[in-house]
Image (tube, rainbow, N blue to C red):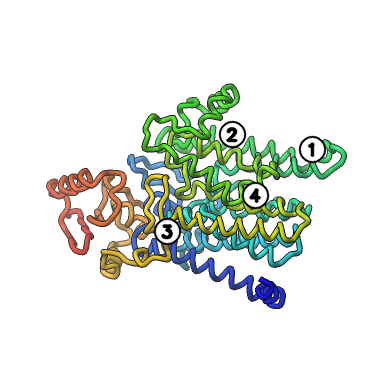
Amino acid sequence: MKMIKKIIIQKPIIILVSIFICFAIIYSLISIVNHYLFRSAALDLGMFNHAIYNFAHFSQNYFTLDIGGAEVNYFGDHFSPITLLYAPFYYLFGSYTLLIIQILAILFGGFGLYKYFLFQNKRIFITYILLIQFFSIWGIYSALSFDFHNNVIAAMFLPWLVYFYEKQEKKKFLFFFVLMIISKENIALWLVFIMIGLLAGRIKTQRNFKFKEYLKFEIPLIIFSMLYFIVIVGFIMPYLRDNDGFNQLDRYAHLGDSLFAIVSNIISHPKYIFSLLFENFTGNELYNGIKSELHFMVIISGGYALLYQPRFLIMLIPIYAQKLLTTDYVLWGINSQYSIEFAPVLSLGIANFIKKIKSNKIVYFIVILTTFLTIFYNYRTIESRKSLWYNKTNTAFYKNQHYSTPFNVKEIYNQIEKIPDDAIISVSTNLAPHLSFRKKIYHFPIVKNADYILLLTSNTSFYPLNEEEYRNKITHYLNLNIYEKQYNKNSLLILKRRE
């Protein structure tokens, strides 16, 4: 241990850069490899790739990959103006653009935490261990294994937001505040509770309650965030959807048929709402244990510290509500991007928890043990988890199966590159992210006026159909005699509309 500490003290930059390079490689092995081997999906990487293509060509984007066939304004499905900023990079990195941005965002968030850790304490050895702990939290790996999502980007701005708040650098704070609020519609609600948490921490450290001072900064931002959320979710997004496409609030229809009704029921039925945080209320025993798995992972990964730092627990109130009050069990557990917000909050909580401990030995023990448990249980849940619809092949970067595929990948790329850029196409979910750079693309079995139908026929996801329905749909379009086979090898079927 003393030797390791000596090396870190003598060559801190080399150690720091090595940590970032190590995790950059791991993250790339998960995300980039999945995309290359056709494991990314129409929803959501295909949708976002389609959006940045339209924005890069200065055209209004319509989300055409809806599984119900709706064609709605992109901002009616996800109000994420930050997506406009990604568009120029499409010319450099093609279909990998958003995956690269997401990896860089996580590393950027990690650097923000590194700055914050040093600001909280000057113990460089502890700082590096905390950084490794953050980069090892399960939420990051689950998010990377399933496409791209703007809430990952927003979550990685949080360390910078907290860092500049505590340093009282308001202009820089507001810069990251704006970046967060334009990342996604629900981030505005998260910012309400983030600001309340920050304000609670500030009040606790001040002897006198300075209401007038809070009226100049924190309280206006809380009010603005809440109004922004209500206006965007309650009015602008429904208007842009024009009652078409998927309404995100439908996941909470059991709590009310409008945003106001949902909030009213949450406030008026606290006992019932509390039960939803822990219980499977669907009646299907298959979903038992999913919520408890989440709670366990939070505690193991540093959640214990939030009990001693409740201002960070306040920040997680809307995240818990978003995940656990829904009827959609997919959100309950530790899969996909639905846990990413926990990662920076947990690390911030640990940093503030150990700040109050004077004994270096106790601090080292807590940090090292937490890091070990975070890594160990991240590995355990990569191997097996209660959360459903999980495929460890997408996440287990340390196994050969992650890099193997039944496809002749080069041949598939060779064939799909022959499809004209101006052609309207209908594609299976795992092909969509690679073919989204065009004006119109549909999610099979939606076909409409497609010039081409491109489908992976085996060893792939058949979403939103089961395999039998999927194959019946293929037979249906072949029998219509509208399309002819252009290619049918290597698990790839290409149908071209007859002229």
Identify the residue position indicated by label 3 in the image: 395
- Horizontal side, residue 374 vs residue 433: left or right: right
Q: CA distance from mark 1 to mark 2?
A: 21 Å
Q: Position of residue 82 (x, y in %)?
A: 56, 52
Helix, strand or loop at mark 3: loop
Whether residue 387 appears in this view of the structure is: yes
Q: Are marks 2 and 4 in contact (CB under 8 Å)?
A: no
Residue density around tag 1, few if under 14, some if 14–19, many if 20 or more, within 10 Å: few
Q: Earlier in the sequence, mark 2 or mark 4?
A: 4
Q: Are marks 4 and 3 in contact (CB under 8 Å)?
A: no
Identify the residue position indicated by label 2 in the image: 230
Q: Earlier in the sequence, mark 3 or mark 1?
A: 1
- Horizontal side, residue 127 vs residue 418: left or right: right
Whether residue 54 appears in this view of the structure is: no
Helix, strand or loop at mark 2: helix
Identify the residue shown where x is 67% and y is 52%.
350
Q: Amino acid at mark 1?
A: Leu
Identify the residue position indicated by label 4 in the image: 178
Identify the residue position indicated by label 1 in the image: 215
Q: CA distance from mark 3 to mark 1?
A: 46 Å
Q: Amino acid at mark 3?
A: Thr
Residue density around tag 3, few if under 14, some if 14–19, many if 20 or more, within 10 Å: many
Residue 13: give its label. none
Looking at the rendered image, the quarter that the C terminus falls into is bottom left
Q: Nearer the viewer, mark 4 or mark 3?
A: 3
Q: Are marks 3 and 1 in contact (CB under 8 Å)?
A: no
